[in-house]
Image (cartoon, rainbow, N blue to C red):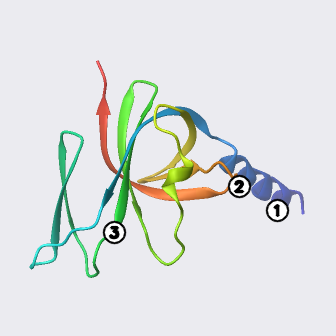
């Protein structure tokens, strides 16, 4: 029983490990080439993705510590409204492998995929 409690507490702790970041940009992309490849320019970066469905994505650019992140959120069935975020405002993020969870103003999470990380000088 104690082992189950420790395991449950550990999982709950992971969700509370949010770090402060500065939201620098949000870009909306809805484009597809005939071969199914989407080439997107986000800030000065070029990101290429291959998908089986028409992409409709938001790219979030934010700075956490001395690292600049570009993450992608697919606008699927359960749409979240990125206009709830304010550019140049603080956001709260947590990293889990190639995923970044952004805490929305209503307290719920938005799961994004890391597309690019850059160490700032």
Secondary structure beneath disc 1? helix
Q: What residue does disc 1 label?
A: 4
Residue under the image location 37 percent in, 40 percent down: 69
The tag on residue 56 is 3
Would you place residue 87 above or below residue 72 in this image? above
Secondary structure beneath disc 2? helix
Residue under the image location 78 percent in, 58 percent down: 8
Q: What residue does disc 2 label?
A: 11
Percent of width and height locating residue 17: 65, 41
Q: Residue reaching furthest top?
A: 121
Residue under the image location 18 percent in, 39 percent down: 44
Q: Quadrant of residue 48?
A: bottom left
- Camera-side mark, 1 or 2: 2
CA separation in Å, label 2 and label 3:
32 Å
- Camera-side mark, 1 or 3: 3
CA separation in Å, label 1 and label 2:
11 Å
Lateral position of residue 97 relative to residue 29, left or right? right
Q: What is the quadrant of the C terminus in the image?
A: top left
Would you place residue 93 above or below residue 21 in this image? below
Lateral position of residue 38 relative to residue 99, left or right? left
Secondary structure beneath disc 3? loop
């Amino acid at each position: 029983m104690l082992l189950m409690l420790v395991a449950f507490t550990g999982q709950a702790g992971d969700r509370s490990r949010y770090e402060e970041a500065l939201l620098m940009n949000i870009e909306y992309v809805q484009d597809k080439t005939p071969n199914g490849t989407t080439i997107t320019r986000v800030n000065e970066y070029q990101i290429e993705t291959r998908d089986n469905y028409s992409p409709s994505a938001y790219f979030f650019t934010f700075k956490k510590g001395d690292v600049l992140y570009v993450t992608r959120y697919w606008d699927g069935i359960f749409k979240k409204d990125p206009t709830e975020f304010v550019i140049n405002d603080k956001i709260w993020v947590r990293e889990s492998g190639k995923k970044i969870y952004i805490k929305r103003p209503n307290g719920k999470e938005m799961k994004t995929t890391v597309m690019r990380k850059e160490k700032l000088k």
